[in-house]
Amino acid sequence: MAGHVSVHYSSLPVKNTKSDSEARLVRWILIILAVGFLCLFLVLPLVAIFIKAFDKGSAVFLAAISNPDALSAIKLTMIIALITVPLNAIFGVAAAWAVTKFNFKGKSLLITIIDLPFAISPVIAGLVFVLLFSAHGLFGQWLMDHDIKIIFAVPGIALATLLVTLPFVARELIPLMQTQGTTDEEASLTLGANGWKTFLLVTLPNIKWGLLYGIILCSARAIGEFGAVSVVSGHIRGLTNTMPLHIEILYNEYQFSAAFAVASLLSFFAIITLVVKNVIEWKVKKSEIPEEGAS
Amino acid sequence: MSIQIQNISKSFGTFQALDNITIDIQTGELVALLGPSGSGKTSLLRIIAGLEAANQGAILFGEEDMTLINTKERKVGFVFQHYALFRHMTVFDNIAYGLKVRPRKTRPSKKEIEEKVYELLKLVKLEAFANRYPFHLSGGQRQRVALARALAVEPKVLLLDEPFGALDAKVRKELRRWLRKLHDDYQITSIFVTHDQEEALDVADRVVVMNEGKIEQIGTPEEVYENPISPFVYHFLGNVNLFKGRLHNGKLQHGSFEVDAPEFAGTENREAVGYVRPHDISIEREASPDAVAAKISYIHIVGAAVQIELIRKDEGDFLEVELTKEHFRSLNLKSGEDVYVKPKQLRVFIPEDYSI
């Protein structure tokens, strides 16, 4: 506002009023507070991770991340992400579709249940599966009889991650699909397209950026999940250790440089997802601007 | 293709959106569904398209019962109020969509599709816009693309939901005339929904006036305008003046004012209302039993006709009178003058519990 006044009367020298300089002061204080807070709690620790990782030179760093246990942890983390992210993407699209395009009883209950993993502690998400599938669990005997291992094995880790990352895609798509409504799909139907073609040619392109955004958030969480995975994994080196678990083990064994080396790799993944996320946001904004301008 | 709408009823929860609607639409007719919002006109259109299912009744296209056929198989062209163009497709791809999604057996070749699309682009005068995206187009252009897209699949029936509702007045009028011409050239049975009485009277062969899920009147624009069969239709189609009074000996009376109401000769002592269009009123300088005293409050002289607002002296109600310019000049009326207002053609209704 203040800027406007001086622009309009630029021919007359206007003295800065008192409220003008006050507003500026407040603005600067807020900016400094926000930036300072971010530096202290986000940037500083992140920098510390990378400094610590290279503390004993790049040789130690390389050795830490090329250690067989580390490699198997990286591999397992990737496998878990590759299992859970596509499943949750499919589930998310299906759930968002159901919630936004149809009316049915128990719709609001479904939305609440989708949010549940956000509300409960990841440790509980892990414990649930222990209660169900461990040796003394509900299905424990049956699983033993059929020689199926879920807890302390890859399926358990996948299940726990699946549960924790369940809301990401659906949560991203529901508001988007709600604002888009159903007329595009109806138009497609009146033009003779069947349901599948309508989804593929009309719905999917309309939601692609939202979907990608949800998938990225989902991947980031799937890679970084600690609590739920820790409960079901059993921490078997080279077998059921994901990257976050491996870092914890290294740290507990006082191998600080190695721990931070793997941590820096994990942080690196996180930074990449952030960058991709921002590029998508920027793309979405760019594709929306002409829409607003024309209407 | 004729359309028969038979005893269609639809309710949303406890709200009765449509109540036993029956309309016969002839092949090649252009019919307007006219009514205020909430009258059920859009619901009816969506039921005809198969986008909504009726609770009761049947829809027939020609002799074929369509009630249980889904939208995809009904072969209707549907034009949405807010265009519903696919925003990630060019104008060309939007229009080609209906042909491209056909199963391989019935799909035209790429070249045929292209020819068809350019033929339609020419029809809607948008040849130069084939490779633009919808957000580059104005509202009127978008609606024309939507129409071309609907026509591309050669529908047997064209359904338009408030097609010009979101456009400004000038574009609206242009598109209206253009739609009429298109309809005359193609002879495709069309139904369009509107809340704009001028639009309905201007374009349609027949108008279906709807209110609260029921049909008030069906007729040609002239019939529904000149001979409304209910107070609602009177109110909804154009301006109207009310003369409240009591029926007595075949006359409508109020104080010293009385006019003939021969159709109510047998009705004694009932409250009634006379309805008069502004152009069915004359202004006199002399008092007479069938005129009421009024004071001219405002004279509006823009356009072909002169609109005069008066205040009745006995009740203080507003009256609206429309005179031709010549007549207005010969009377030499001034604002603030006392005159007598005489209904030339008045239709009496006994008020029931209706509301507008």
Image (cartoon, coloured by chain):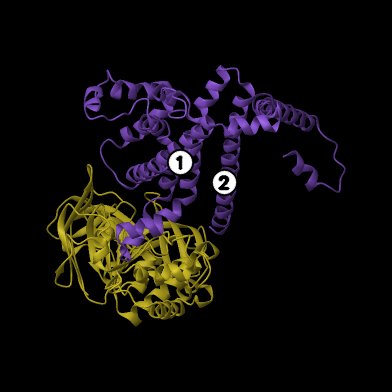
Chain colours: A purple, B yellow
Mark 1 — residue?
Answer: A172
Image spot of residue A181 (x, y percent) = 39, 50
Q: Position of residue A140 (x, y in %)?
A: 25, 23
Quadrant position of residue A31: top right
Q: What residue would you read off at disc 2?
A: A281
Q: Which subunit holds the residue at mark 2? A: A
Q: Residues within 10 Å of mark 2 (few under 14, many from 20)?
A: some
Secondary-structure class at tag 2: helix
The local crowd at label 1, few if under 14, some if 14 to 19, many if 20 or more residues have their Cα within 10 Å, is many
Up-down: is B187 above or below B5?
below
Is A157 or A210 nearer to us in this picture?
A157
Q: CA distance from mark 1 to mark 2?
A: 13 Å
- The residue sitting at 41% across, 47% down in the picture is A177
Q: Could you tell whether B280 is left or right of B327 in the image?
A: left
The three-letter amino acid code for the residue at tag 1 is Glu
Q: Is residue A163 visible?
A: yes
**On the rendered structure, is B15 left or right of A36?**
left
Residue kind at label 2, given as amino acid type: Glu
Q: Give the mark count.
A: 2
What number is the disc on residue B72?
A: none
Quadrant of residue B233 in the image? Answer: bottom left
Chain identifier of the residue bearing label 1 in the image: A
Q: Quadrant of residue A84?
A: top left
The vertical placement of B115 against A246, above or below, is below
* Residue B261 spot, x, y in % from top left: 21, 62
Whether label 1 touches label 2, CB < 8 Å: no
* SS label for mark 1: helix
